[in-house]
Image (tube, rainbow, N blue to C red):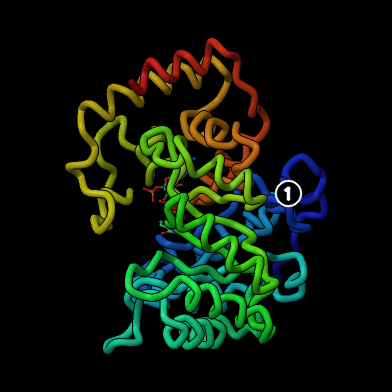
Amino acid sequence: MYSPAANRYDSSAFYRRCGRSGLRLPLISLGLWHNFGDKDSFEAARAIICRSFDLGITHFDLANNYGPPDGAAEVTFSRILHDDLFKWRDELIISTKAGYYMWPGPYGEWGSRKYLLSSLDQSLKRMRLDYVDIFYSHRPDPDTPLEETMGALAHAVRSGKALYVGISNYKPADTARAAKILRELGTPCLIHQPRYSMLDRWVEPELLATLENEGIGSIVFSPLAKGLLTDRYFKGIPADSRAGHDKRFLRPADITDEVLAKTRKLNDLAQSRGQTLAQLALAWVLRHKVVTSALIGASKVSQVDDCVGATKNLNFTGEELAQIEKILA
Ligand SMILES: NC(=O)c1ccc[n+]([C@@H]2O[C@H](COP(=O)([O-])OP(=O)(O)OC[C@H]3O[C@@H](n4cnc5c(N)ncnc54)[C@H](OP(=O)(O)O)[C@@H]3O)[C@@H](O)[C@H]2O)c1
């Protein structure tokens, strides 16, 4: 029988307010994109979730298509939730999304009301839940009016199947338009989920300022660049790593000499701060107050411990930031 650590909420600094909402999220959240599929070890998945909760991680991020196969991560999560964590449901923020391909025919992907609301029902069924805390439009749909997609999100809230709504992968102008529509519908946009790391800085020129202006929080995904911003690949490609065993989104060819030269230098800087490279990379994205949470993935319990350790030192000197810019240039 799992029993959570009694000291899991000892650090109030571990929670940051999400935009201008009443909701606070942990600085580190756990995503189930990888390592929670049918072929992954259920015991490892269970240990990662339970250890995360022990460390104060209250937010678990899913999507309809996480697996493989599609939907499998929601089923794995449901098993862990109902076996171990359901007693603490009111302490959990569970999110899911719809946007990518899920089923054949014209209603199985993108941003129609038909797809989003059917997909949400399917996710709730897989997770055996009455509601999720956050429901996202996973990607913008160039062919569906934004009013329809946002209307479907607002309907999810009004029908009691989601408490809050968010958008993911939306560009700055569409974000501002989506925020306006949602405000008018009485269901403010809680959060944006963009990709952001030292190796992918597309949010910096405009999106972060847009979010700040709109009072929307953000949870940044792949802050470790899928493992590149860690020591995982310093001695080759381990068989149990993402690039070693699941090459769908991180290929061995992505581990280039150029990337390794940068990450080795960043690792030296991390050590001089008394941090691991993963901790440095997480502290760096969290230096923006508009970044509510860094959304990590993990294949091992020890990685979750290491990542949460990042929050012990989120401060950077001007000189350290300049050194990072020089390394990344
Ligand atoms: N909205 C979207 O479109 C979208 C897209 C992608 C992801 N996401 C969300 O973001 C979440 C995180 O994405 P991600 O998994 O790519 O994030 P990430 O944190 O950049 O990468 C996670 C991987 O880094 C390695 N790692 C983690 N901590 C480590 C540590 N302390 N030391 C060494 N290695 C460490 C592990 O690799 P190994 O597995 O090799 O051990 C782990 O699987 C997803 O689960 C999902 O919820 C959203």
Image quadrant where one finds the N terminus: bottom right
Nearer-the-camera pick, 302 or 186: 186
Find residue 309 and report its horizontal and vertical position in percent.
62, 36
Residue, disc 1: 17
- Please determine whether, in this image, residue 163 is positioned above or below residue 23: below
Could you tell me which residue is drawn at 46 percent across and 36 percent down? 204
Task: Name the residue: 50% across, 74% down.
Answer: 147
What's the residue at 60%, 85% (across, down)?
128
Could you tell whether 199 is left or right of 56 in the image? left
Position of 260 relative to 153 (above/below): above
Q: Position of residue 247 (x, y in %)?
A: 23, 55
Q: Is residue 48 visible?
A: yes
Whether the residue carrying mark 1 lies under 8 Å from ligand 1 is answered with no
Q: Residue furthest top?
A: 319
Q: Nearer the viewer, residue 41 or 78?
A: 78
Between 329 and 185, the residue placed more toward the observer is: 185
> For the residue marked with disc 1, what is the amino acid?
Arg
Image quadrant containing the C terminus: top left
Mark 1 Cα shell of 10 Å, populated few (<14), some (14-19), many (≥20): some
Q: Is residue 252 above or below residue 184?
A: above
In the image, is 244 to the left or to the right of 171? Answer: left
